[in-house]
Image (cartoon, rainbow, N blue to C red):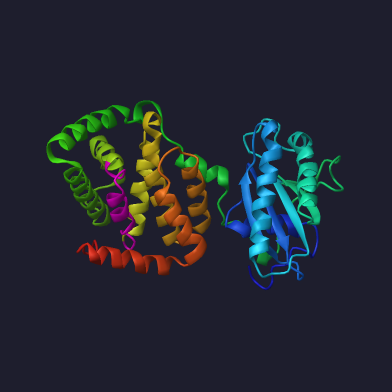
Amino acid sequence: MSDDTNVMNGPESLVHILPHLFGYHPEAALVISGLAPDGEPVHFTRADLPADTSDWPMAVRDLLAFQQDKVARGTETVNGLVAWICPDLTDPLYGERSMARHRPLAGLLGVAAATHHADLLEVVYVTRDRYWLMSTDAFSEGRPISPPPAEYDATAFPRSSDVRATLAQVTGDRAIAGAVENVLKDVERQMRTDGHGAVAADAAALLDRTIRALVDRTTTIEQIPDDTAARLLIGLQYSHVAGIALEYCEDHELPAARGLWLHLARLCPTEVDWCAIEPTVLYAATSWGLGHRGTARLALHTAVRIPGDYYLINLLSHAMNVEHSYEDFRKRLRDSRASRGRTVTG
């Protein structure tokens, strides 16, 4: 946050500051933040907004507990808390009626804050064009969101629902379930004769050929055969291959790699949705490398929702939350690439 950012200079600042906390506009989310003495948000965190009302109490308790743990481990003075309720854009009651439905959440947030001896200063309900201060506006039609001042401009930030729609798996004629099924049979036969090492080596070689062709523009995403896409999806299940995939991190490689990971994540059949974790996380990593931090975080959120192995998720989450700089992360990837004796593509 910059020195110009101060959420306490008027109620609408509570709305304008929200996307700046994460680099995107959260939807279908609960957000809570501490406020430093100068009004700057500190120790902010988010959680998915449960659709089932019976899940609300636990979601609120867990969110407050996690946020207060961050406060306890931090060094900043916290004068109070602010919470935001951001409804799901696809909610058929989206707007004033969904605000009325979610009104009990404000009470649950107040109770949870009191349990932690924290002062909840405000709960804000935010849609795309209106907001409600739950302490005073809960029975009104809400307040229109006016254009923000320059320091709050978030028009370039993605919206969570848009990114999730971009990552949604394709269905119908474009799905490649048949190709994946055939590749799984081939891989099973190869494993019996040559072992896992040979399967992983072939996948790594195919990955390198594919990205080289995309970088050199001798092929396009649309020209990648379904069989190749299926083999890459299965090959990325080997952590060794997924690690190699991360290493396509140079500026001239990132756009091609990002396009490939998005293509694979979308083509992954729902029957084997666990295959979507790796390309989704790789899409997050390359988005981060290209400066789209908000999209990267949203892609990670999407990956977490998929049952499967979270090793790659944890690796990137640690890099983004602890190392902070993609350049630092890229240095480690370059060292790893060099240790494998791999040259830079292009």
Tell which residue pokes out farthest to the left in this image.
193
Q: Position of residue 315 (x, y in %)?
A: 42, 56
Q: Nearer the viewer, residue 219 or 62?
A: 62
Does residue 241 appear anywhere in the picture?
yes
Q: Is residue 74 above or below residue 235?
A: below
Determine if the magenta segment contains residue 172: no
Residue situated furthest bottom in the rendering = 3
Total numbered labels placed on residues in the image: 0
- Provide residue 277's location: percent of width, then percent of height: 40, 43
Between residue 340 and residue 11, name the one nearer to us: 340
Residue 95 screen position, x and y as percent: 73, 38
Please provide the residue range marked out in magenta.
235-252
Q: Quadrant of residue 93?
A: top right
Q: Position of residue 178 (x, y in %)?
A: 28, 27
Classify the position of the C terminus by image quarter: bottom left
Q: With 242 as the anchor, is 75 left or right in this view? A: right
Q: Is residue 287 left or right of residue 197?
A: right
Residue at position x 75%, y 67% in the image: 39
Q: Nearer the viewer, residue 73 or 179?
A: 73
Q: Residue at horizontal 35%, vertical 66%?
A: 332
Residue plotted at (36% across, 69% down): 331
Q: Is residue 86 visible in the rendered structure shown here?
A: no
Q: Is residue 250 magenta?
A: yes
Q: Is residue 87 found left or right of 161 in the rendered image?
A: right
The quadrant of the rendering that contains the N terminus is bottom right
Which residue is at a point 45% across and 61% down the rendered structure image?
319
- Horizontal arrangement in the rendering, residue 314 relative to residue 186 (left or right): right
